[in-house]
Amino acid sequence: MNSVQTGSLLISMPFLGDPNFERSVILICEHNEEGSFGLILNQKSSFQINDFELFDDPDFDQEVFLGGPVQHNTVHFIHNLDGLSESQEIRKNILWGGDFEALQEQVNLDYESVEGKIRFYLGYSGWGPEQLQGEIESKSWIVFNDYSTNLFKIKPEELWKTVLKEMGGDYAQFANFPIDPSLN
């Protein structure tokens, strides 16, 4: 089993049973002795970024995803933009956060330069010390560190299946499990 680290993907088991995380893929943005912080990559919200009036250009109307059940009054973002200061590298070609004023400036000058390179999230997923490890040991999550999937190119509704198929073996079979096996 892979151990959790910054940049890991957490893939929910097919029958997790928690509606907050059903069929979720979470990018771990920070993992240390104080706990873990991650963003659910594949849960759409009903919001567009312009609903929050953060950018002046009305054409920059990116969808906003639910990053997790914690602090829905916060907006986070991951990206693969060159030169956005204060960004934290999660892994190659995936950065978290950065200078938001510089991002606003870049979007307002040329929003097309960031399209397909950024995703926004409302709230986040968090775990206290040892909490995530306990959930992994109880078989709630699969940890995947060696993925080659370009997270910005996969449709969110296909991400869970795509990642499981990339893992191969028994995990690839999980991708075909029904959401509710009693309906099978």
Image: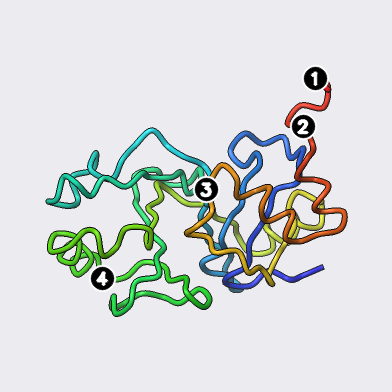
**Please, what is the three-letter code of the amino acid marked with disc 1?**
Leu
Say the numbered circle drawn on residue 99: 4
Query: Where residue 120 is drawn, which disc sits there?
Result: none
Q: Residue at left 37%, top 56%?
A: 76
Residue 21 drawn at (x, y percent): 62, 42
Dot placed on the residue nearer the N-terminal end, 4 or 3: 4
Element class at badge 1: helix
The amino acid beneath tag 4 is Asp
Q: Position of residue 20 (x, y in %)?
A: 58, 38
Answer left or right for 41 relative to 119.
right
Image mark for residue 178: 2
- The disc at residue 155 is 3
The residues tagged by marks 2 and 4 sit, at their Cα atoms, a distance apart of: 42 Å
Residue at point 47% right, 70% down? 94
Q: Is residue 118 left or right of residue 2?
A: left
- Label 1–label 2 contact, CB within 8 A: yes
Residue drawn at (43%, 71%), measured in percent from left and top? 95
| Disc 4 from disc 1: Cα separation | 48 Å
Q: Position of residue 68 (x, y in %)?
A: 51, 46
Q: Residues under labels 3 and 1: Cα distance? A: 26 Å
Estimate the spatial distance between the alpha carbons at disc 4 and disc 3, rounded to whole Å: 27 Å
- The Cα–Cα distance between marks 1 and 2, rounded to whole angstroms, is 8 Å
Comparing labels 4 and 1, the label whose residue is closer to the camera? 1
Mark 3–mark 2 Cα distance, whole angstroms, equals 19 Å
Please report the residue visible at 33 percent of the width from the left and 77 percent of the height from the top: 82
User: Which of pointers 2 and 4 indicates the residue nearer the eye?
Assistant: 2
Residue position marked by numbered label 1 in the rendering: 183
* Front tag of 3 and 1: 3
- Mark 4 element type: loop
Identity, as a three-letter code, of the amino acid under mark 2: Pro
